[in-house]
Image (cartoon, rainbow, N blue to C red):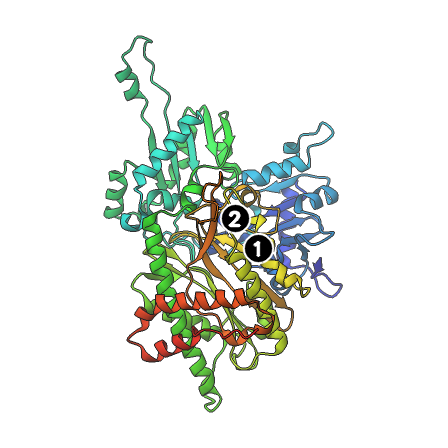
Amino acid sequence: KISNKSPEMAAHPMLTELRALLKKEGVEAFIIPSADAHQSEYVSACDERRAFMSGFDGSAGTAVVTLTDARLWTDGRYFLQAEKQLYPGWTLMKQGSPGVPSLTEWLAQNTTGLIGIDPSVYSINGYLALCNQFSHGGKKGQDKVKSISPSPVDGLWKNRPTRPANPITIHEIRWAGVSCKDKIKVLFEQMRTHDADLLIISALDEVAYLLNLRGSDIAYNPVFYGYVILSIPPPSSFSASAPEEEKGKSFCPQATFYVNLSQIDEAVQKHLKGNQVNLRPISKLSEDIRKLNTRKAWLDSGKCSVWLSELCGKAAVMHKDTPLGMMKAVKNDAELKGIIEAHEADAAALCRFFLWLETQIEASKSDSKVELNEWVLSEKVEEFRKHGSKYFVAPSFATISSFGQNGAVIHYKPSEKSALKVNDQGVYLLDSGGQYCCGGTTDCTRTMHLGTPSEFEKRCFTRVLQGHIALATVVFPEGTPGPKLDALARIPLWMDGLEYRHGTGHGVGSYLNVHEGPHGISASTSNKGIETTGLCPGMLVTNEPGYYKNGHFGMRIENMMLVTEAKTSQPQSERKFFKFQVICYAPLQKKMMDISIMTKKEVEWVNAYHAECWQRLKPRVANELSVLKWLQEATSPIVFDG
């Protein structure tokens, strides 16, 4: 753990104010998660309560404030960032590190009084885990937890931003592939199978996917605030002898979309009506749920809040993943067509950027007016994407543009005021992506040296590349979850005593969130979903091993991969086998590779990959002779003389 406490450093004034409010509520501790009411990973400014209180603005982390202490739990991606950002009076708990207790374990060891939560943003799973931690010796964990609404943090937030309510648009069926009506039909069938008469859909990407709508209420994520309620009313009172036709009429499923109505135009209204979706103001959500005579409610406990569960009253509540996660994860042919279009356009934009960067670096050696820094580069790569495709909408996440020592901060975000100058004396890492309305969400990382890399830098890069290739070329049996493949990307690094503190891959949406479940590739055991979800054809997953030397550089290679069926030498096998197809087409920097430690097969993989990049991108830059020449050189074969 890292503490920002010291005798000469007083606690941040907001901690004192919050503790006074906690005393009034009669609680000893209060938990501040990073999520909003929809359990979003990325939230709008009005929901950044944890950042407001602690100073740490990474996308993952949970804060706890007690009457005498304040702690923040986050994972290895954010250790360095949190150390720099945390306000005085806070202690960083390095989640997953040896000897560091989990949040619930720490609370059990260090508190005796009530634990406060805001039920509107606390997930059902989080609540159940908290209760379970304190359930022992005949005591009920629920008695230890107190709901406080609204959050006491809101009372301290004097200039809290307003909630966005931007226009909502239709995601065209030619890119969605399946109509909203047909998706809802699948859910109603599953509700009947599980004898549920109410299904609450809260996750914003699932709402957008289900309705074939997109928005811009959260930066980088084309989503909007809203809920969908699917209900199957109980049959009306009628005699047992009533005809079946009459009974059927009284058993009418309803799909209702709750949203700020100012975001809906006539075209969206028509779209919803045509798909038999009712429209209601979001302010009526709680009232309407309470009015329903619900017997059994279906809530995804990882994506729904405690508040939503409380609204269901005395109804039985089934905590189970809905089919939407897998429906969204397995892309259909129409989605894949748009995804490939987006990735080709994205890679062409990156090629233009890399050529521009190399040209500017060379010019800066003789012209002092040419000034390059991390911020300028992050803005420039967005500009190339914007001008490179009519489908480009916005970045898919905050661009990680890091030079030298900043590269070791895994999720580093440059600022205009503090950005480092970029030159030919160090390693540059660019992790960036775009949202494309044709259905593509891209995420690509390239690491390069703009001068001459050292032998150590080349060796580290090559170990990362070897891990990347090992994962990209694996063939695996049906039902294999991502974590079983994770070590493949790490073994070459382990050979040199190197490691990275983040997952190896995550799912990606179709013009939706850049991080998407239920699948993924990681060594972590904290996400039960990815441990039980087998990778299957149609899924997208990233492949992004890395290495980070604190104070010196960061290296990561990231490509998007599509799971496809593999042809094996035993086609009559009882099990199907799958493989990965790389769909990111930006060349890798060859001068960063140490060919002397690579195998012939690894070099052949690089050459085949670059040949694919050339074939895909050549038509897109054919009329740009300088870019075409750069691409041809960047993808020319490596000669292996080993």
The picture places residue 207, in percent across and down from the top left corner, at 39, 43
Tally of marks: 2
- For this orientation, the residue located farthest to the bottom is 366
The kind of residue tagged 2 is: Phe
Question: How many C-alpha atoms fall within 10 Å of the one at disc 2: few (<14), some, or many (≥20)?
Answer: some
The picture places residue 187, in percent across and down from the top left corner, at 38, 34
Q: CA distance from mark 1 to mark 2?
A: 19 Å
Question: How many C-alpha atoms fall within 10 Å of the one at disc 1: few (<14), some, or many (≥20)?
Answer: many
The picture places residue 56, in percent across and down from the top left corner, at 58, 59
The kind of residue tagged 1 is: Gly
Q: Nearer the viewer, residue 301 or 289?
A: 301
Q: Describe the element under mark 1 as helix, strand or loop.
A: loop
Q: Describe the element under mark 2 as helix, strand or loop.
A: strand
Mark earlier in primary sequence (1, 2): 2
Q: Residue at position x 27%, y 12% from top?
A: 243
Q: Nearer the viewer, residue 193 or 393?
A: 193
Q: Residue at position x 62%, y 46% from top?
A: 525
The answer to whether residue 452 is left or right of residue 383 is right
Which residue lies under the disc numbered 1? 503
Q: Nearer the viewer, residue 11 or 394?
A: 394
Q: Does residue 554 appear anywhere in the picture?
A: no
Residue 476's disc number: 2
